[in-house]
Image: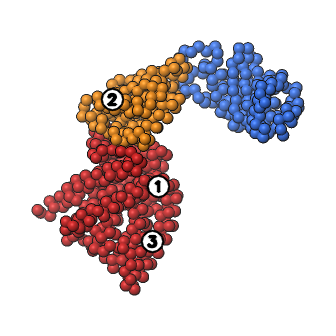
Amino acid sequence: MTSQLQILFWILVFPGFVFTAVLGLLASWLVRKVSALVQYRIGPPFFQPFRDIRKLLSKEVLIPQEANKWVFIAAPLVGMAGVLLLSTLLGVTAFWPKATFVGDIIVAIYLMVLPSLALILGSSASASPHAAVGTAREMKLVLGYELPLVLAVIVVIIKSGGALGLAAISENTPVASISGAIAFLVCLLCIHAKIGYVPFDMAEAETELGSGVLMEYSGGLLALWNLTSAMMLVALPMFLVMVFLGGIGTTAGSISIGLLKYVLVVVLIILIKNTNPRVRIDQAMRFFWIWCGLALIAAIVLATAGNIYGIGWL
Amino acid sequence: MSLSAKAVKKSPWVFHVNTGACNNCDIEIVDLLTPRFDVERFGIKLVGSPRHADALLVTGVVTAQAAPRLKEVYNQTAKPCVVFVIGACACGTGIFHTGYHVVGPVDKIIKEVDPNAIIAYVPGCPPKPEAIISGVVKALSIL
Amino acid sequence: MDRVQLIESLAKIKNELIKVEKTTDSRLYLVCESLNAYKVSNFIFKTLGCRFVTATAIDSFHYYEVLYHFSHDQTGTVLTVKALIRDRGNPSIESIAQFIPGAQWIEREMHDLMGIEFRNHPDMRRLILADDWPQGVYPLRKKTKDEKVS
């Protein structure tokens, strides 16, 4: 295959759109099913998320009269593009390591901001007071967790001796050390906030804001948002697996172990989701900046000390 | 029914509208959406915005204050949608039919906006959650 | 003060009251004319220190009644000022919202539904009837037939 065809295949089919969308919708079914079992009920059948997307695609799209039409329509497309590229990048790094480039972890961090940014833009273009409150909360939340996220990745970069490529980083398992474990836990919570699950779902606070940021979206655009959310359930845990848990190899054995690692991260997300109430935005910001920030500074110190003195488990 | 109405059948997202009810029917609807009755098996989910909804659960005899608001909410619901009229008051104004503030049962107000609206009735005072589930499932199965 | 002292202290406004009814141990009705209701309510609220609970308007056949309910929390007694408005053509009473801001909304509701005018009310607007309800039609008066106006 020529290079362009191969890139198109990567983006559109595997590990791009088709693969990520299907796996993402299955993961979102898993989240709903496990939450249902925890609440002592049965929950939706296997293909319910697919039915939801199909139904949304067949509804009419209503755009508020005073909304900024082009930003309103473009925002979900930008969000989906960000997640799509992120999952393509991670998948290509895992299965075609020679096709990657140094510094792609920085690209991954930038791509991870895109869905949140798109959400902020889309909801502020909605011309609705509910969406405006949701926008303010989402902006503060993003301000809150981006710093710990980058600090956690810095811990990993220090532990892997300064390597900036995902392929090189995913050969180690930083989580087997103290600083790596701290960074893994903080990064898990940041990912949790980015997907927008309880306890950090105050932007789309259903009982307070009547759907908050996504209040005015309907039909196909809402389907795009839901699909983006489902795809984030693939891309972001995959990011955690590759950066902290040792990645996914290319042999059949390591692929199945990699899949188990992915399921472990998703199960952790489900556990956190089902055992916590929603927190206020000021509590969330305080948590991310003060508690997570201090923990990560300690982790950076430990990681640097471990590097200098050659102690692996620090 | 058209293809799009068939898609609503398998994944109806509901939005609850109270147009002046005594709250009995609203309590039963809120009970319905708790884990005990588990309506998520049918794909039913409570959404916070009428724009996300496929089914409106309307309770209450429509008062003069609530009538323009109910019409606005119906307009904001993305079509195709189904209107479920819950409770004796909503189905036909019940014991309040001589009230000074009552402008008519829900279907009269909805038909002023959209004469071809799909309306399903679940009578009762209040209907038990099992009755509401049965009504919703029956109505969706003949869509 | 206990209940006995409470009833004794009502002697100070004896001149403004028509009678004092004691239906049960904890309920006192102070019946007065509508012109004296302001002074009586002022006395009960400020001097006796009772808490304003709510108000009621009744269309009795010969007069309108406006009842202001006050609670004496130390003894659990509820004192009700029963003001009789004898002018049925143009019912009017002095508003107690001037010194009890919490009474503003209930007086607006009584005005909406019964048509009783509250003189010197700080903010008399429509409260619970619909925005396009015609002026001058008071639904809870006994004479109003149950016809739909809108």
Q: Which residue in the protein does label 2 denote? A: B139
In front of the other: B58 or A146: B58
Tell which subunit mark 1 falls on: A
Q: CA distance from mark 1 to mark 3?
A: 23 Å
Q: Quadrant of the N terminus of chain B?
A: top left
Between disc 2 and disc 3, the foreground one is 2
Of the numbered discs 1 and 3, the one sitting upstream in the chain is 1
Q: Amino acid at mark 3?
A: Leu
Return the residue found at the far left: A1
Tell which subunit mark 3 falls on: A
Chain letter, red:
A
Q: CA distance from mark 2 to mark 3?
A: 55 Å
Quick check: B56 above or below A92? Answer: above
Q: Colour of chain B?
A: orange
In front of the other: B113 or A229: A229
Quick check: A288 above or below A49? Answer: below
Q: In percent of the image, x 30 and y 36: which residue is there?
A: B8
Q: Which residue in the protein does label 1 denote? A: A276
In the rendering, which numbered label is found on residue A248? Answer: none
Chain letter, blue:
C
